[in-house]
Structure formats: C-alpha cells, structure tokens
Image (tube, grey):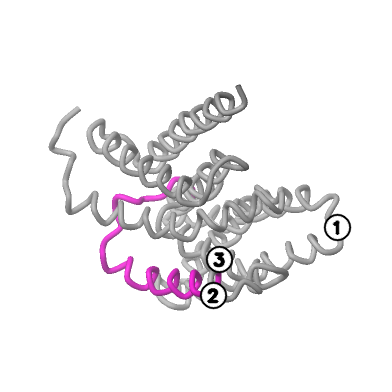
Amino acid sequence: MSLEGLDASILLPAFAAGLLVLATHVPLGREVLARGIIFMDLAVAQIAGLGVVLGHVLGWGGGLAVQAMAFGAAVLGALLLSAFERRLANVQEAFIGTAFVLAASAALLVVAQDPHAAGMVGDLLAGQVLWVDWSRLGPVAVLYALLLALWFGRPGWRRGPRFYVLFALAITASVQLVGVYLVFASLIIPALAVHGRGGAWLAAALGVAAWIAGLVIAALADLPAGPAIVWTLAAAALVTGLALRGRATRGQS
C-alpha cells in the first residue's frame, strides 16, 4: 500500500465520472425499483456493449459511428423491453434475463476471431474508470444534462417507451465510461439501500461516499477501481440500510 497511488490527475476525472453517472442513475434506479425491472439495466448495458464491440470489429474506430451503433442497439433493445412490459408483464424479467445472455454471448462470438478485440469485452464489463480523462467527460455531461432536463422538466418522459429511450441513452454513455458492473451497482445499490425509507438525496450521498472510498482504496492498494467501487457501494448500502432500520425501530418503540 502506497500513497503514491493518490494521483489527483487520475483520481479527479474518475470521481467526476462517478458524479455524472450517479446524477442520472440515482433517479433512474429508483424508477427501476418501482417498476420491478431490476435487471433491465444489465440487459441494456450489455446490448450497448455489443454495439460498441460490433463497431470496433467492423473497423469503425472509436468515433461517432461506433457511438451511433451503441446508441442504436441500446435504444432498439430498450424499445423491445418496453413492448414486453406492455404485453408480457408477468414474464418480463425472464425476457430481460434472456436479452442479457443473448447480448453477452453475441459479443463473445463477435470477438472470437479477433484477438485484438477480445480484451474489449472485459473492459466493458469491469470498466477502466481510472483511464477516463476530462476530454471524455464533456460530451457525456452535455448528454446527461439534457436527459435530466427531460426527466425533471417533462415528467411524461418517465412513462411508456420514452422512459426506455432515456434509460438506453444514459446507460450507453455510462457503460463506456465505467463499465457494466459499475453501471448496475450505481443504478441499483444506492436506490435499494434507501428503498421505502429514504429519499434521492440520501441515495446520492451514499453513492458519492462509496465512490470516494472505492477510488481511494483502489489507488492505495493498487486494485482495479471498478470492482473496488462496487464493493464500497455494497458496504455503504449495508451500513445505511442498518441505520435506517434502526431509526425506524426506535421510532416505533
């Protein structure tokens, strides 16, 4: 363990990425829990990742063409899941799980003959948040600002297919910043910790504290940042949940 890992030029952009992700994923996560479609983000994130892999294998580089492929795949997948919600609500989670497995398997098949692209699947899952730089955050910040403006300024966008479109756009951007695992953890764990017992601000505070702790632990112990943050999110959620439960018990006595 060494203090040399605490490099602000690396940690600050990574933390800023976490703040951007939490800004959109906390309200989205509360909505996902309310709808009972907890694993939808995993499916949409994996579909977006499949779009990224396809774009790179086709030789499109990392520019707008790949982004268009990723966004298009995620929106299409999200709209299909929206159709399942309307017509097959009783087995919707089964379809969501199937969509995730199919997208993940397709990504492995696509890179099977391309050794240069094979590592991309692992990066999309675990993320490379410590490699994020300020230049990547600007476009994402603009996109998230537009999504939040629609979310809070146009409540009608929270219903029906439009919710899935907003969800897909947010997830696609965040997957390429922090990876599938951190997207799911940032979306679900803070919302789950305060579900039915706290508000969005408490969930956001939990997320921010966990991101700080995870980045510091990863830097000091030379660990992968993504998995470290997932575990600090879980630990913070456990502590918060126990505190809220204790407060509720004292209030009833």
Q: Are marks 1 and 3 in contact (CB under 8 Å)?
A: no
In the picture provided, is 3 more to the left or to the right than 230? left
Kindly identify which numbered label has been placed on residue 51.
3
Kindly identify which numbered label has been placed on residue 88.
1
Compare residues 2 and 98 and report the one nearer the observer.
2
Where's residue 22, x and y in %? 44, 54
Write down the region rendered in magenta. Answer: 125-151
Residue at position x 37%, y 73% in the image:
139
Where's residue 70, x and y in %? 53, 68
Whether 130 is among the magenta residues is: yes
> Which secondary structure is most common in the magenta stretch?
helix
Secondary element at tag 3: helix
**Which residue, given by chain and number where applicable, does mark 2 sit on?**
153
Secondary element at tag 2: helix
For badge 3, the amino acid type reads Gly
For badge 2, the amino acid type reads Gly
